[in-house]
Image (cartoon, rainbow, N blue to C red):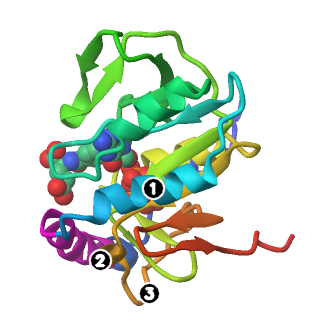
Amino acid sequence: MAAPHSTPVMGDPPEIAQQKALARQHCVQSLRTRGPDADAGIRARLKTLLSPRPHQAIACVWPLPHEVDLRPLCHWLHENGARVLLPETTPRGTPLIFRHWHPTCAMRVGRFGTHAPDGPVLAPDIVLVPLLGFDRAGNRLGYGGGYYDRTLARLPSAQAIGYAPASQEVAALPAGPHDQKLPCIVTEREILRFDPPSS
Ligand SMILES: Nc1nc2c(c(=O)[nH]1)N(C=O)[C@@H](CNc1ccc(C(=O)N[C@@H](CCC(=O)O)C(=O)O)cc1)CN2
Ligand SMILES: Nc1ncnc2c1ncn2[C@@H]1O[C@H](COP(=O)(O)OP(=O)(O)OP(=O)(O)O)[C@@H](O)[C@H]1O
């Protein structure tokens, strides 16, 4: 019997991958040296955007040491009736899964030093997406795992909201075939909204 034909799942072309790697170096450096008020400003704007409904499942992010700290927002969402989820970093090449968090739950250390709760896996209604970099077209840059691209591609009805200090804006990010544009990006300065792609 003939072997079935399958379309290889291609990553980024080499020139795009190289441009992203360069942009990543720049963005990691500016994230580490961001201003002291950026995190609180981002949390305040996210609060204005998220008015949690009871049991609404909102995927937040537990920060790596140099990242924007959403932990106070996790507590606020929990106190206001939302279900707070956090990503568990799955093996490379697979989408993230999200586990239910509450203030006293046990946390486990996972891949790349990320932390995830020891709770049940749930599907998010809203996904907060950490950004290393972004541009004014809604393109985002992460650490290069492709995790959020794979995850958002499988959650078409979830609302994705990117967040980053304003310092992480770059003129134009390179975009590969799998890159998911974000409909909304929040910084401490503004809330950017982008039109959905026309079909
Ligand atoms: N706090 C947090 N959790 C998160 C993410 C994130 O960006 N921040 N993710 C977002 O997708 C996923 C984990 N993704 C990651 C993918 C790759 C690397 C990584 O390669 N880290 C390198 C250093 C990268 C650098 O500094 O340039 C390493 O640990 O050597 C880290 C996280 C899910 N959880
Ligand atoms: N849905 C997908 N299917 C196959 N490959 C993908 C998919 N999403 C992303 N990739 C590939 O994974 C690699 C890493 O992607 P990219 O550089 O965009 O990661 P990132 O968005 O910076 O990281 P992250 O999403 O983890 O924050 C790229 O080669 C990209 O083409």
Magenta segment boundaries in residue numbering: 18-33
Q: Amino acid at mark 1?
A: Ala
Q: Amino acid at mark 2?
A: Ser
The span from disc 1 to disc 2 (Cα, nearest Å) is 17 Å
Q: Secondary structure at mark 2?
A: helix
Pointer 2 residue Cβ closer than 8 Å to ligand 1: no
- Whether residue 86 appears in magenta in the rendering, the answer is no
The residue at 83%/74% (across/down) is 198
The residue at 65%/36% (across/down) is 52
Residue 175 can be seen, yes or no: yes
Residue labelled with disc 2: 167
Say few, some or many: other residues with alpha carbon within 10 Å of mark 1 (under 14 / 14 to 19 / 20 or more). some
Q: Secondary structure at mark 1?
A: helix
Q: Is residue 82 above or below residue 33?
A: above
Q: Look at the numbered discs 1 and 2 and tell me whether their residues touch, using CB distance below 8 Å.
A: no
Q: Give the number of the disc on residue 172.
A: 3
